[in-house]
Image (spheres, rainbow, N blue to C red):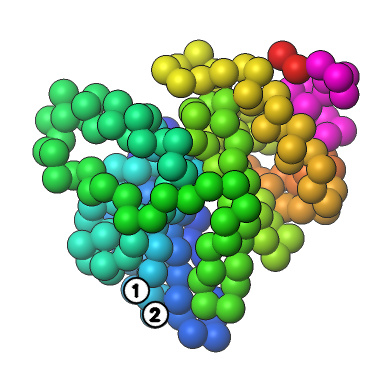
Amino acid sequence: MVGQLDTNCVIISDPSCGDACIVDPGDEPEKISSCIDTNGLRPVYIIFTHAHYDHVCAARELKERYHAAIIMHEDERAAYADTKRLCMSWGYDDEDFPPPDILVREDDIVRIGSLSFRVIHTPGHTPGSICLWGHGVLLTGDTLFRGSAGRTDLPGGSGEHLCHSLKKLMRLPHPTRVLCGHDGESSIGIEIRTNPFMAFPDDQCM
């Protein structure tokens, strides 16, 4: 966990070659770098599940250190610009928010060494929120939490879109591990059974 909001920054790596990606580097670049360097990893990507400040604020330092390409969804550009404006009002510099190198969309594949993860576009928390699915694991950012779901009252949020996104995740295999943007992990099956945000009629959204 990093930053004042305890964001779960996830590092995915292929142990056979050391290639890695950093998902949601929200803060504390030294802490993230220490983990990477201790394990001899080579980050090739920095991925934003969405562009709120608590998921992106260590991106510049990590990009400069590892020369990794920044990835986010093509619909997240406005949210990233809003985050930049907000953080600059707090004293950050313009260059603290490097532009994305790669814009992805639904069903694109991100490859890290021999590993591959499918991009699932899950708008609702923000217009360009994504989840990453592969190898029995789903990284959900702030779309789905253990027992809850992302808030929709911030600029660009939509309860209806979030509902459709959660329905999309419900179609994944039930044993799929869910690694959330905050708090502990779960599984798709557990969330279907226990999460009130995933208990709605098939023909209805919030």
Q: Is residue 193 magenta?
A: yes
Q: Nearer the viewer, residue 38 or 69?
A: 69
Residue 160 position within the rendered picture, expressed as x and y whole percent measured from the top left: 65, 18
- Return the residue nearer the eye: 3 or 52: 52
The percent coordinates of residue 105 (x first, y second) are 53, 47
Magenta residue check for 66: no
**From which residue to which does the magenta span run?**
192-204
Find disc 2 in the rendering and name its residue. 40
Residue in view at x 49 percent, y 29 percent: 127
Going 79% across and 39% down the picture, which residue do you hit? Answer: 170
Name the foreground residue: 35 vs 136: 136
Which residue appears at 53% of the width and 27% of the height?
125
Q: Amino acid at mark 1?
A: Asp
CB within 8 Å, label 1 to label 2: yes
Pointer 1 residue: 37
Question: Would residue 191 be visible to someone looking at this image?
Answer: no
